[in-house]
Image (tube, rainbow, N blue to C red):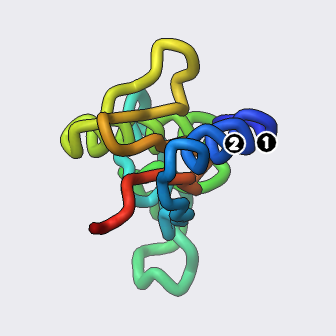
């Protein structure tokens, strides 16, 4: 995640290049990512319609798990690379292309891009 200072710097640089600023939220971000690296089971709630004391396996990176943030970051990285962006060598939450600067703050995106002509 980028700091507030780095977000401000990214915005200043982008605006000085004449880029437009767009902010975006990834709704239900963690639920888009698969849980990787371990298996997690939770007791099924009574209203799930399963026998008493049943357990269900968690397959998505749900909020509250210590590694959900990392799972979402990996999910987002794959999509940003597919979109043609490169990760900065300077900071892992800064991405760029010829016409885009992008900062990741948890599940929010700060996007500076060339305007539409």
Is 95 in front, or is 49? 95
Using residue 57 as the reference point, say whether residue 8 is left or right of it.
right
Query: How far is the residue under mark 2 from the one under mark 1?
Result: 5 Å
Res 2 → quadrant: top right
Give me the disc on residue 37: none
Q: Residue tagged by mark 2? A: 7
Residue 46, percent from left and from top: 56, 80
Q: Secondary structure at mark 2?
A: helix
Q: Residue at x 52, y 86 (%)?
A: 47
Using residue 117 as the reference point, say whether residue 17 is left or right of it.
right
Q: Residue at x 56, y 63 (%)?
A: 23
Is 34 in front, or is 42? 34
Residue 1, percent from left and from top: 64, 36
Q: Residue tagged by mark 1? A: 4
Q: Secondary structure at mark 1?
A: helix
Q: Is residue 102 above or below residue 52?
A: above
């Amino acid at each position: 995640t980028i700091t507030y200072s780095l977000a401000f710097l990214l915005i200043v640089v982008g605006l000085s290049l004449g880029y437009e600023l767009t902010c975006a939220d990834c709704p239900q971000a963690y639920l888009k990512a698969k849980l990787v690296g371990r298996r997690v089971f939770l007791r099924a709630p009574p209203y799930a319609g399963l026998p008493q004391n049943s357990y269900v396996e968690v397959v998505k990176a749900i909020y509250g798990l210590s590694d959900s943030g990392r799972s979402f970051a990996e999910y987002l990285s794959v999509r940003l690379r597919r979109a043609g962006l490169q990760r900065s060598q300077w900071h892992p939450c800064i991405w760029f292309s010829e016409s885009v600067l992008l900062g990741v703050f948890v599940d929010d995106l700060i996007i500076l891009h060339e305007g539409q002509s």
